[in-house]
């Protein structure tokens, strides 16, 4: 294990809040009922799930009846892409060019089964415009357009999309709209009704809840087929015995989000501004700087410094950062998000992501910037010697 003691990778996963763990403990050690059972233990489990459903709905601007629990964001995204497409029949799927692989890959799987697939481009700041969506949907007008999926906030750059405007354009074409809001929940206000989408994905472990729980928020007017078949849990859309403790933890984490969002956002934005002022003084290039971004996320590169090398150097000095998405950063290829934004591959390979959390402090930022400066200077000296 490394000597890391400053955690700056909250877009990858977040530490479990002690208050969330406290809410979970009875369901790990005492309450072991199955929510489909009729006895007192089962009724207790069902009540706990119903309470968590209401807590998640409150944090997401939805009605509890719209919340379908899953094992995480990946499953929820797969359920949305595959389930909505299968229910509608062969047609056209459009996704943005910066989606997470758990949206891209199920869309590609549907393409292999006969669906048409288009990608909506982004501009140099990582923004997806309603005009770009309009262009893609116009090009597909002779096909049966079914589904558009655009993430609310990007996991690498933190760029926030105008989903309500995008959804209005898509709805005018009769297209169902899904948004992956995994990175947005807990950092900005998320309102399912205001976003005007048909389906929205959330994940527990991004909001200081436990891993192993997520949700798909679904407009009851949209047809969707289950991906997992069995006992018919979650209104028949997600069979399998519910992960009771994780769902309770997800609900508890969402209740904290509802109560503390404004305070969290202000604190994260203050620390990000401190960080980015320091990054600018080091000559780092910040990606998506001109766009509206999550208050906790900075994605940058120092020219002529390899990102993976810098990540490992910082880890040895006690700072956990990332080179991109935690779910897809082992490929060795430049970030597909940056390439879609027109960033040159050599610069994209230098990308490093810092994603802050509620436990970080301004002192952590100061220490990080000092160490970053030292490591960048050291790596530049090594490069000069090698040349």
Image: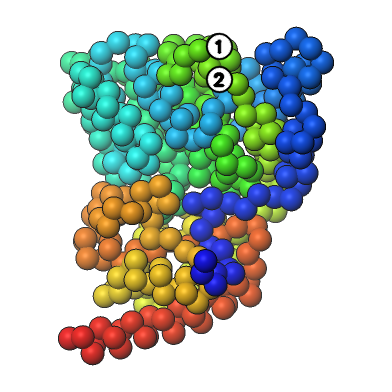
Looking at the image, tell me whether mark 2 or mark 1 is earlier in sequence order.
Answer: 1
Task: Identify which residue is drawn at 63% across, 75% down.
Answer: 363
Tell me: residue 302, above or below residue 52: below
Task: Identify which residue is drawn at 64% across, 43% down.
Answer: 209
Task: Identify which residue is drawn at 65% across, 68% down.
Answer: 361
- In this orientation, does residue 164 appear? no
Tell me: residue 129, above or below residue 285: above
- In this orientation, does residue 253 appear? yes
Tell me: residue 118, above or below residue 253: above
Cα distance in 3D space between marks 2 and 1: 6 Å
Task: Identify which residue is drawn at 53% across, 31% down.
Answer: 71
Decide which of 271, 112 is in the foreground and name it: 112
- Give the SS element for disc 1: loop
* Image coords of residue 145 (percent x, y): 28, 18
**What residue did someone put label 1 on?**
231
User: How did the renderer colour the structure?
Assistant: rainbow
Residue 99, picture quadrant: top left
Question: Quadrant where the C terminus lies?
Answer: bottom left
State if disc 1 and disc 2 touch (CB < 8 Å).
yes
- Give the SS element for disc 2: loop
**What residue did someone put label 2 on?**
240
* Image coords of residue 91 (percent x, y): 25, 16
* Image coords of residue 372 (percent x, y): 45, 78
| Tag shown at residue 11 | none
Crowd band around label 1 with a 10 angstrom C-alpha radius: few (<14), some (14–19), many (20+): few
Decide which of 346, 279 is in the foreground and name it: 346
Residue 133, picture quadrant: top left
All told, the count of numbered labels is: 2
Q: Is residue 198 left or right of residue 81?
A: right
């Amino acid at each position: 294990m490394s000597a890391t003691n400053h955690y700056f990778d909250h877009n990858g996963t977040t530490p479990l809040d002690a208050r969330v763990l406290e809410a979970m403990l009875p369901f790990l050690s005492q309450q072991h009922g199955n929510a489909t059972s009729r006895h007192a233990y089962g009724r207790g489990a069902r009540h706990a799930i119903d309470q968590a459903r209401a807590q998640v709905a409150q944090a997401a601007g939805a009605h509890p009846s719209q919340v379908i629990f899953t094992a995480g964001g990946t499953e929820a995204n797969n359920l949305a892409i595959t389930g909505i497409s299968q229910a509608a029949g062969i047609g056209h799927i459009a996704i943005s060019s910066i989606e997470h692989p758990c949206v891209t890959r199920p869309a590609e799987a549907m393409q292999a089964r006969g669906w048409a697939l288009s990608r909506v481009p982004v501009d140099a700041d990582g923004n997806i415009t309603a005009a770009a969506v309009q262009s893609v949907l116009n090009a597909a007008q002779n096909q049966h357009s079914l589904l558009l999926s655009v993430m609310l906030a990007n996991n690498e750059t933190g760029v926030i999309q105008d989903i309500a405007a995008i959804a209005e354009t898509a709805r005018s074409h009769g297209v169902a709209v899904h948004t992956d809001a995994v990175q947005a929940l807990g950092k900005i206000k998320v309102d399912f009704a205001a976003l005007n989408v048909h389906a929205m994905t959330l994940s527990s472990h991004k909001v200081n809840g436990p891993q192993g729980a997520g949700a798909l928020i679904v407009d009851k007017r949209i047809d969707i087929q289950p991906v997992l078949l069995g006992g018919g849990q979650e209104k028949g859309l997600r069979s399998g015995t519910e992960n009771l403790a994780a769902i309770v933890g997800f609900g508890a984490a969402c209740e904290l989000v509802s109560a503390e969002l404004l305070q969290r956002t202000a604190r994260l934005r203050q620390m990000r501004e401190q960080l980015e002022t320091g990054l600018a003084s080091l000559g780092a290039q910040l990606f998506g700087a001109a766009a509206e971004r999550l208050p906790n996320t900075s994605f940058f590169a120092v020219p002529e410094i390899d990102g993976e090398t810098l990540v490992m150097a910082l880890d040895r000095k006690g700072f956990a950062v990332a080179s991109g998405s935690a779910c897809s950063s082992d490929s060795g290829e430049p970030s597909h998000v940056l390439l879609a934004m027109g960033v040159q591959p050599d610069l994209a390979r230098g990308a490093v992501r810092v994603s802050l959390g509620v436990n970080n402090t301004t002192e952590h930022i100061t220490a990080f910037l000092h160490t970053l400066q030292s490591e960048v200077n050291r790596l530049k000296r090594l490069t000069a010697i090698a040349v």
